[in-house]
Image (cartoon, grey):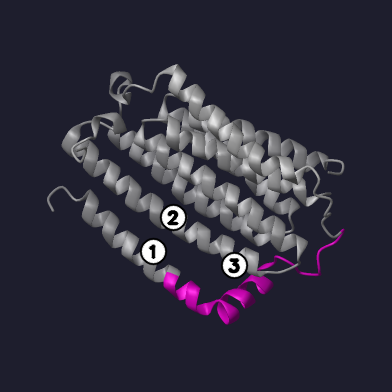
Amino acid sequence: MSIAHYLILSAALFAIGAFGVLARRNLLIILMSVEVMLNGVNVALLAFARLHANTAGHVFVLMVMGVAAAEVSVGLAILIAVFRNRKTVDTGDLKSLQG
Amino acid sequence: MGSIDPVFGIAAAVTVLAGILTVTQRNPIYSAISMLACFLGLAVVYLRLAAPFLAAIHVLVYTGAILVLFLFVIMLLNLKPEELGVEYSLKIRGAIALLCGGLFALIALPLWQDQRTLPKDPPPAFGGVEQVGDALFNQYALPFELISVLIMVAVFGGVLLAKKKL
């Protein structure tokens, strides 16, 4: 079993998530796409941990999961605040900061 | 590139297909359900990578906490079809898809020549609770504590941001 398979899966997930972040305008789906990207990175970390038989990769994956949980909780709180004030989850409508 | 392990092949196919569905569905609830399939496929991949502890944590954190949080917010917002907003035109989305396909090719094409194979059997107890816990609390104790601070700040921030009156 080659490590390349795992890294290609990782790259595929990252590219899919990047597409979601760039091409979608629904804030909920953008946040979900970020999760998919983070999971792609986790696969690569675990594959290298297995290749070098080093547990450090597992610890990093735990850190990524912690950061992902924090990011989602704050992101969804912002989304709720935005929806309450603007009645929209479309990023195209949120242009108060546009010059 | 050697032969593909069938369990990994199926799990990877499910993961990628569910991932594509996650980012392309119009209705967020279908996206969330696709994300569930994506995460369960990933848990199988983690098991193939000799990481049983992280596979369990992955299912707990991602499907148990993050996905449920998404579902709660989707139900709370209760978006009607006309409130989902408009999407970019097909031309723009096609261009972005091409760009992301290029990103994937940029990473995946060099890997085609990658001959490194994973060791047949991992060291005994590799990826179990004992080893990961040992590394986490000895070598990486400080990052671990910092993550706990980050999560606490995120909890306070989430409550503050979602409050009706600031």
Residues at marks 2 and 1, CA–CA distance in whole angstroms: 8 Å
Residue situated in front as seen by the camera: A47 or A22 = A22
Q: Amino acid at mark 2?
A: Ala
Q: Amino acid at mark 1?
A: Ile
Residue B86 to residue B159: above or below: above
- Residue B151: give its label: 1
> Few, some or many C-alpha atoms within 10 Å of disc 2 (few <14, some 14-19, many ≥20)?
many
Q: Is there CB contact under 8 Å for labels 3 and 2?
A: no
Residue lying at the far bottom in this picture: please name it. Answer: B138
Same subunit: marks 3 and 2: yes
Residue A34, image x, y percentages: 46, 44
Which residue is label 3 attached to? A59
Q: What range of the chain is rendered magenta?
A: B120-146
Can you tell which quarter of the image residue A90 is in? top left
Q: Is there CB contact under 8 Å for labels 2 and 1?
A: yes
Count all numbered tags in the image, as a single digit. 3
The residue at the point 64 percent across, 51 percent down is A43
Helix, strand or loop for disc 3? helix
Q: Circle 1 marks a residue in which chain? A: B
- Decide which of tag 3 and tag 2 comes sooner along the chain: 3
Quarter of the image that includes the N terminus of chain B: top right
Residue A29, image x, y percentages: 42, 35
Residue B89 to residue A62: above or below: above
Can you tell which quarter of the image residue B71 is in? top left
Residue situated in front as seen by the camera: B65 or A79 = A79
Considering the whole magenta stretch, tell me its main secondary structure.
Answer: helix
The residue at the point 40 percent across, 45 percent down is B69
Q: Circle 2 marks a residue in which chain? A: A
> Few, some or many C-alpha atoms within 10 Å of disc 3 (few <14, some 14-19, many ≥20)?
many
Which residue is label 2 attached to? A69
> Few, some or many C-alpha atoms within 10 Å of disc 1 (few <14, some 14-19, many ≥20)?
some
Residue B164, image x, y percentages: 15, 47
